[in-house]
Amino acid sequence: MLISGIEQGDGAERIAGMEESRCAAQQSRHLKPQMEEAEASVSILRRQLMERRLARRQAETILQGADIKAHLESLRRMQQASDERFLDRREQAVHKLDETPTEVKNHRPDMPES
């Protein structure tokens, strides 16, 4: 309105334009502390969000480590069970060999019998 009032030379328009400018400046002064307070609140909330995100990622890392540890322990137990089965079978085979007659133990198929 100020520009149109100046261009047209109308006094009432000029006064209205100046009043609008004055009100805008006053509103700006009034809103500035509220905007600064809002920016400070946003900054605090952003920092809290980042702290929570960091804590969540740390917890995820700990949980992943625990999962990996549990998986490795499971693999170790499976290997141990497999080793024990192998040793049991080997021991059973040795006992069976001990129970066979001596002439069967000493028999060598590649050698002709005398």
Image (tube, grey):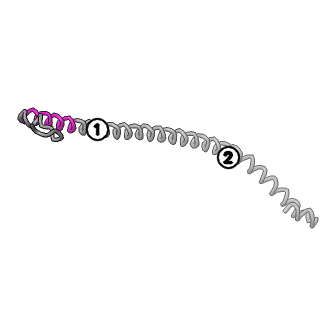
From the image, which quarter does the C terminus lie in? top left
Specify the quadrant that holds the N terminus: bottom right
Q: Position of residue 48 (x, y in %)?
A: 54, 40
View extreme (front): residue: 114
* Residue drawn at the location 51% of the way across and 39% of the way down: 54
Residue 14 visible to an observer of this rendering: yes
Looking at the rendering, the stretch of residues picked out in magenta corresponds to 84-100
Residue flagged by tag 1: what amino acid is it?
Gln
- Residue pictured at 91% horizontal, 65% vertical: 10
The dominant secondary structure in magenta is helix
Residue 49 x, y percent position in the rendering: 54, 43
Q: Residue at x 89, y 64 (%)?
A: 5
Residue highlighted by disc 2: 35
Foreground mark, 2 or 1, reads 1
Q: Nearer the viewer, residue 51 or 86?
A: 86
Please, what is the three-letter code of the amino acid marked with disc 2?
Met
Q: Position of residue 20 (x, y in %)?
A: 80, 57
Seen in the image, is 60 located left or right of residue 80?
A: right
